[in-house]
Image: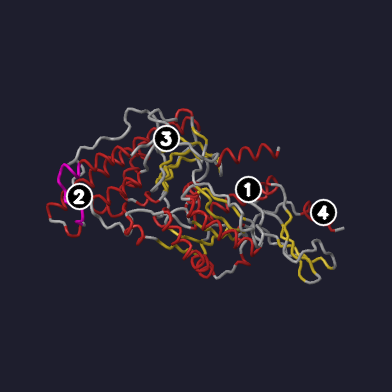
């Protein structure tokens, strides 16, 4: 009887966005519809499940995807908690399906960065563990919601530092298990790309994205949620790493990040005073390399006898400060020229594959740099496309981008079932420290050197394609 009832119910209301939640309280069973304005149903004297804990009935991802595109879908009913701990910021946010940010909290590890001169994985893990419960609770409090009001939990599972990722995943699974919520594993770099769709309603697929952070440099063609073509990546160090190292070598205060400190000092310098070479100009691809530029900077500091050892910029003489500013400005000019050249080529490649492309998204922590934004604005003008940059607070690591990416995938039926309320102590968490985003473009393969591939996870795009083929 129960089965036939649910069968007729699902056929009658096919335009629903995600699985029904069937719960049993006392002598009643009721069905909540997330994504519809239909009232809850009560079924007297029918015990669908003997367990007291809520159970879930899943429908196919195809049906959910069709529902997600329906005009009948009420996205406002969808509320997702996003958790981010991939590196040195502990972040959580609650976001509605329509993009409304209900609450967000970020706990920075700036003091640890300053003390250790960079990210120390073990120290970062301990810092995450100390504040993760408080950060998540504060995000819920800021939203005036509780776990009972959530539709799902999204969490970054890679790429990133494995010790740090584990803290966020553990917390997310505990919340999801306690409140019987589906859980969505999120790719950190995809989240940086897709958050632009939250702030710009006109941004549609396909689009080109430049993702720049402390550990990543990526140029991707975004064809759809979960479907990406990697046009270029870094073969050694990312631009954020180069900024941080240069800032530290110049004796800057990096408590608020090396990038902002270096950009500020560079405004005082002559960007043509030091003749750094632009990396990889002999290679006609879209890959990046900043290791050589870092070496050039170090040699320039030594040749100018800049007194930076144990001499912070605040204590520098006028001449010493001017010398450091010149190095900072010259470094920044060449580092960004490298970005410009790669973006120019990537735009041409992307237009050959998808002629309708008219947007370049620039996101990631380094995208907060105003000099980079201004230079790339010239690139898009020359190529007659539009530049889309999220606000700086959504460029750096945050929970909003994770929650929003979770929403995008959830509406396509891509999520895992609720974990148990208590997981075994030996449970192996799904974390992916080295996880490519998209499939590599044939012409984008680096001729400079082989990229490190040890213990690398299959790309997000290949996983989604494989899953779709298995369901056919």
User: Circle 2 sits on which residue?
Assistant: 325
What's drawn in magenta, residue-wise? 300-311
> Whole-percent x and y of residue 101?
51, 61
Q: Is residue 309 in the magenta section?
A: yes
**Among the two numbered marks 1 and 3 on one chain, the one whose residue lies closer to the N terminus:** 3
Label 2 vs label 1: CA separation? Answer: 49 Å
Q: Is residue 276 left or right of residue 77?
A: left
Tell me, yes or no, whether the two marked residues, 3 and 2, touch with CB atoms within 8 Å: no
Q: CA distance from mark 1 to mark 3?
A: 28 Å
Residue 387: give its label.
none
Tally of numbered tags: 4
| Pointer 1 with pointer 3, Cβ within 8 A | no
- Secondary structure under the numbered disc 4 in the rendered image: helix
Q: Which mark is residue 8?
A: 4
Question: Which disc number belongs to residue 412?
Answer: 1
Front residue of this view, candidates 120 and 14? 120
């Amino acid at each position: 009887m129960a089965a036939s009832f649910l069968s007729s119910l699902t056929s009658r209301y096919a335009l629903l966005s995600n699985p029904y939640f069937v719960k049993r309280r006392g002598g009643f069973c009721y069905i909540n519809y997330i994504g519809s304005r239909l009232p809850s149903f009560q079924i007297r004297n029918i015990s669908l499940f003997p367990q007291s804990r809520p159970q879930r009935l899943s429908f196919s991802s195809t049906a959910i995807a069709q529902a997600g595109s329906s005009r009948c879908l009420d996205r406002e009913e969808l509320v997702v908690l996003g958790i981010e701990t991939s590196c040195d910021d502990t972040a959580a946010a609650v976001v509605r399906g329509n993009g409304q940010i209900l609450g967000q909290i970020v706990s920075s590890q700036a003091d640890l960065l300053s003390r250790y001169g960079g990210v120390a994985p073990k120290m970062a893990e301990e810092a995450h563990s100390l504040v993760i419960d408080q950060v998540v609770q504060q995000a819920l409090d800021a939203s005036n919601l509780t776990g009972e009001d959530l539709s799902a939990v999204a969490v970054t599972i890679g790429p990133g530092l494995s010790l740090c990722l584990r803290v966020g995943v553990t917390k997310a699974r505990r919340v999801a298990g306690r409140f019987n919520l589906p859980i969505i594993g999120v790719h950190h770099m995809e989240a940086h790309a897709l958050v632009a769709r939250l702030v710009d309603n006109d941004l549609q697929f396909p689009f080109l994205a430049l993702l720049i952070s402390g550990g990543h440099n990526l140029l991707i063609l975004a064809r759809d949620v979960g479907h990406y073509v990697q046009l270029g990546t870094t073969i050694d160090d990312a631009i954020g790493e180069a900024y941080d190292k240069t800032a530290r070598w110049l004796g800057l205060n990096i408590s608020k990040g090396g990038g902002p400190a270096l950009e500020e000092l560079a405004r005082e310098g002559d960007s043509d005073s030091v003749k750094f070479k632009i990396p990889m100009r002999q290679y006609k691809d879209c890959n990046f390399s900043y290791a050589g530029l870092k070496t050039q900077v170090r040699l320039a500091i030594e040749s100018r006898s800049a007194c930076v050892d144990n001499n912070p910029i605040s204590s520098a003489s006028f001449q010493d400060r001017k010398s450091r500013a010149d190095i900072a400005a010259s470094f920044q000019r060449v580092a960004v020229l490298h970005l410009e050249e790669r973006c120019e080529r990537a735009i041409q490649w992307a237009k050959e594959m998808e002629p309708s492309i008219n947007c370049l998204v620039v996101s990631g922590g380094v995208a907060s740099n105003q000099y980079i934004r201004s230079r790339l604005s010239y690139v898009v003008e020359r190529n007659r496309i539009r530049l889309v940059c999220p606000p700086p607070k959504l460029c750096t690591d945050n929970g909003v981008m994770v929650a929003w990416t979770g929403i995008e995938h959830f509406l396509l039926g891509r999520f895992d079932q609720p974990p148990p309320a208590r997981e075994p102590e030996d449970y192996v968490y799904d974390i992916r420290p080295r996880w490519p985003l998209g499939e590599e473009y044939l012409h984008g393969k680096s001729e400079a050197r082989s990229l490190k591939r040890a213990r690398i996870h299959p790309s997000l795009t290949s996983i989604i394609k494989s899953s779709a083929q298995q369901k056919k």
